[in-house]
Image: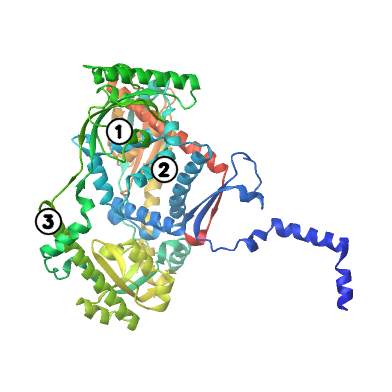
Amino acid sequence: MLQNLRDKTSGWIAGAILGLLTIPFAFFGMDQYLFQRNDTFAAKIEAPPNWWPSAPAVWPVTMLWQRDEIKADEFRAAFERARQDQRQQQGEQFDPRAFESVDNKRKVLDTIVDQRVLAMAADRDGIAVGDDLVRKTIQGIPAFQVDGRFDPQRYQLALASQNPPRSPSQFQEEVRKGLQQSLIPNAVVQTAFVTPAELQRVLKLLGERRDVSFAIIPPPAPDAAPITAAEIQKWYDAHRDDYRAPETVSLDYIDVDQSALPAPAVADDATLRQRYDDEKARFVEPEQRLASHILIKVDANATPAQQQAAQAKAAALAQQARQPGADFAALARANSDDAGSKVSGGDLGWVAKGVMVKPFEDALFSMQAGQVSDPVKSEFGWHVIDLREVKPGTQKPFEQVRDQLAREQADNDREHGFNDLIGRMVDEVNRNPTTLAPAARLAKVEVRHAGPIARGQGNGLLANPAVQRVAFSESMIEDGTVSDPIDVGNGHSLLIRVSGHSQAHQLPLADVSSRVVAAIRADRAAKAADAEADRILAAVKAGTPLKDAAAARQLVASDVPALPRGAPMPDAQAVRAFFEAAPPAPGKVSPGKVALGDGREVVFAVSRIIPGNPDEASAEQKLSLQQQMVQAIGEDDVLGLVDSLRARVKVTVAEDRL
């Protein structure tokens, strides 16, 4: 039987059938078998290769596509930052439940996607940022300046003091990446312009005034009519989303504050001297060189003849600069192509290693003071360097830095003590994973209780995004165990345990009936005011002057001639409605109504429009308005560009990871 089976599955017919069967596997899922992995992205961006923009989205062609992923952790961090920004902006008005909406999550994610799409477009189109722009950007950062000038020592110390420390080359690459991402949108913004006719039209609109009459309908008397059970049920059913309780947790927690720990013993001189010997390199002021230069710029696509001509010119200038009595600054002002230093005679100030491009730096630090270099080739062209002075690196003595070492040693000892305490507390938790009491006794702190706390709420340290992520994690809720230490910054670590949990749920009508009744009464009052406004508005539309229509209902109409935009009369919201009304026909009025936030209604009639006079605006006002318009138009153009770029890529969103 086995031989018969073998015979029937051999030969060209069986091979052809097997080949046909492999085709769907190749295009529909074979990559799932060949490339097993656990995806962790919140969104994945895929773009066809630049040389094949119409490449189909099928395997194996998709292996040629450019890809980028936004990790779920990255999205959550961005979402928490957005949450904190909203909380600060809105204060007590902040609604954490509303902020958790799918729309808000997608807005945050879309912002990150837009940034990545622009970066991918820059990479795909070969947009690069030169060293000169990176250098100028870094030198323009105020944190690296002293008295308005870039200071190499401050630059290096600032990078070394960051957490984690960064080398100049690492920081330069970060700046380069940020500049590359912003080059396209910045270039698009710079192409925007406003014509004189457009500026005149906007000035007329901004300066426009309107003759307006309006009557204010006060809020109606509080509704006291009976409300039936059927009405309550109907309102509740129609507005169920307004009566939901958010997901909450109750927490037990302990807070370990590093600053509250006993002060460490003061370090003796032997310890400090050992620290000084181990870290001597930190206390060396780097060698600096006072330099000037002349740049003969050469384009990247220059011909060999142009390159030779530039080199020859640089060599001639170097020869002139070496002549007795030669004025290097005058030669630089007359010949240099470096706009940044030309005016100051080529002066570059004090230069330390890690600031200039490598060919320039290598030449500068191989020279002697008072020497003028031969032409030095860099990506910008040919440089002639004048080394005016050398400030050698110096070692600071122990006595000069002793106080700094003592402070650092005390901070280290305190941090080591804190870390040791946290480690011993973790050991206690491992022995007693469902209670905080032993760890609290060890740290000599009390176990505190908080809750119920809704997601995104909480006070103080409990509002920290890291605490929130742990508190609402599935494992913490299900296990009821103590968390790992949560670093919340400023020398604080929290250990928490979820002692209670409630899923988001619909509140029963019995629990919110008073809120439903209040909502019904508010809705009745708003409809009553709106109906009264409609009656007055109908009379005005029928030809009755607003003054008479208002008087018929014991209301007073006010006439405001030449009302300007932005005037708070009677309310900013009402004024916006006045200026949104259509222009009135000759001999007619343009009526309308608007509901104010305090329950009042305003019925109005616009009788005349007075265009603004552009000549009344000063030159400064016109220039400021033009700049604002150009910026707004440029930003709209960038949004259009991003939309166009996104239309060319495939974005896959993992909704379950948002």
The disc label shown at residue 402, or none: 3
The reply to whether the C-beta atoms of the residues labelled 3 and 1 are less than 8 Å apart is no
Q: Residue at x 47, y 43 (%)?
A: 119
Dot 1 falls on a residue whose secondary structure is helix
Callout 3 amino acid: Arg
Q: Which mark is residue 177?
A: 2
Kindly report the distance in space between the C-alpha atoms of the residues bearing marks 1 and 2: 28 Å
Please tell me the numbered disc located at residue 364.
1
Which disc, if any, is residue 463? none
Observer able to see residue 63: yes
Q: Say few, some or many: other residues with alpha carbon within 10 Å of mark 3 (under 14 / 14 to 19 / 20 or more).
A: some
- Camera-near label (1 vs 2) is 1
Q: CA distance from mark 3 to mark 2?
A: 40 Å
What crowding class fits label 1: few (fewer than 14 Cα within 10 Å), some (14-19), or many (20 or more)? many
Q: Earlier in the sequence, mark 3 or mark 2?
A: 2
Is 271 left or right of 292, judged from the image as shown? left
Which one is nearer the viewer's eye here, 240 or 391?
A: 391
> As shown in the figure, which amino acid type bears the numbered disc 2?
Lys
